[in-house]
Image: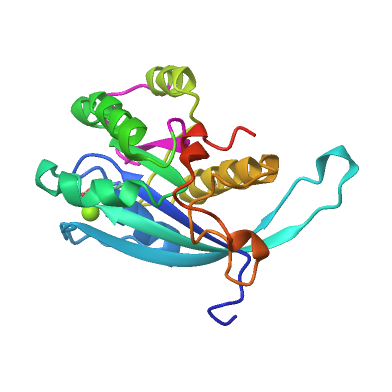
């Protein structure tokens, strides 16, 4: 598949405290493997993957398969990189917020990440999937019930993932992609979609990025 052969370019951003496994999870998703060596992400980095998305064909409409070029942006959780990463919030269509199941503090900090999202994302209620990572480890400090209740309260799907074993990594990312694609399908106007999402040959590319309506989240 050449570089231009895709229907949508979707940018996802991965957020969460330092050490929760953001880089490992992205590596597992894009390469299907786990690196044991700890390499701290400095600032921001991204990985890419081509996937296909087939809509459900509800209401008698025919199923359609779309080619999606996923760009997965990895952030550094450290406070000192905050100003750098907030610039990237605006371009992302969806967010994976990750905490470490063995660290209560990283779960408590999810609230801060959600606040950041509310302030800096392209709209006030973007699509988010919550992941409790390191599910392969035995000493969980956050129960599934606790995390699920929190996620439900904030309208997010929740997955217990393991970047080490790969458990639930693909379902977590693909659930997020599904939410984004459904939001796009719902939106007739599409004027809220950030610039660059649709492939250049698509007429819908003619989007005015400065559109003041974009904060409305495509609820059209
Ligand atoms: N056991 C286990 N360790 C993990 C998992 N994900 C990441 N780690 C480890 O946690 C540490 C931090 O991972 P990293 O991906 O760098 O976290 P980041 O700072 O959020 O990008 C590393 O030592 C990883 O090997 C996981 O799912 N299970
Ligand atoms: Mg990292």
Q: Residue at x 81, y 46 (%)?
A: 57
- Figure check: 122 above or below 219: below
Chief SS of the magenta region = loop
Quarter of the image for residue 204 reads bottom right
Q: Position of residue 46 (x, y in %)?
A: 33, 63
Q: Report whether 70 appears left or right of 45.
A: right
Applied colour scheme: rainbow
Q: Residue at x 46, y 52 (%)?
A: 209
Q: Residue furthest left?
A: 80
Question: Is residue 175 or residue 216 the one in the foreground?
Answer: 216
The quadrant in which the C terminus is found is top right
Q: Is residue 138 visible?
A: no
Quarter of the image for residue 100 reads top left
The quadrant in which the N terminus is found is bottom right
The verdict on residue 81 being magenta is no
Q: Residue at x 58, y 41 (%)?
A: 179
Q: Position of residue 27 (x, y in %)?
A: 35, 61
Q: Is residue 206 visible?
A: yes
Start and end of the magenta stretch?
Answer: 124-144
Q: Report whether 66 appears left or right of 11.
A: right
Q: Residue at x 49, y 62 (%)?
A: 196
Q: Position of residue 102 (x, y in %)?
A: 25, 32
């Amino acid at each position: 598949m050449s570089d231009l052969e895709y229907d949508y370019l979707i940018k996802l951003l991965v957020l969460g405290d330092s050490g929760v496994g953001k880089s490992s999870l992205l590596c597992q998703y894009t390469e299907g493997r786990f690196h044991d060596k700890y390499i701290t992400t400095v600032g921001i980095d991204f990985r890419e993957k081509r996937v296909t998305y087939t809509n459900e064909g509800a209401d008698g409409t025919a199923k359609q398969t779309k080619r999606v070029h996923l760009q997965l942006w990895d952030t550094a959780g450290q406070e000192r990189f905050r100003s750098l990463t907030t610039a990237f919030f605006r371009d992302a269509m969806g967010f994976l917020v990750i905490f470490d199941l063995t660290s209560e503090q990283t779960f408590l900090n999810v609230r801060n990440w959600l606040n950041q999202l509310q302030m800096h994302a392209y709209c006030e209620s973007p699509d988010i999937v919550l992941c409790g990572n390191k599910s392969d480890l035995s000493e969980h400090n956050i129960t599934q019930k606790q995390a699920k209740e929190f996620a439900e309260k904030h309208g997010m799907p929740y997955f217990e993932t393991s970047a080490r074993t790969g458990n639930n990594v693909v379902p977590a990312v693909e659930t997020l992609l599904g939410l984004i694609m459904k939001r796009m399908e719902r939106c007739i106007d599409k004027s809220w979609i950030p610039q660059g999402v649709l492939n250049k040959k698509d007429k819908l590319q003619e989007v005015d990025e400065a559109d003041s309506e974009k904060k409305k989240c495509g609820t059209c």
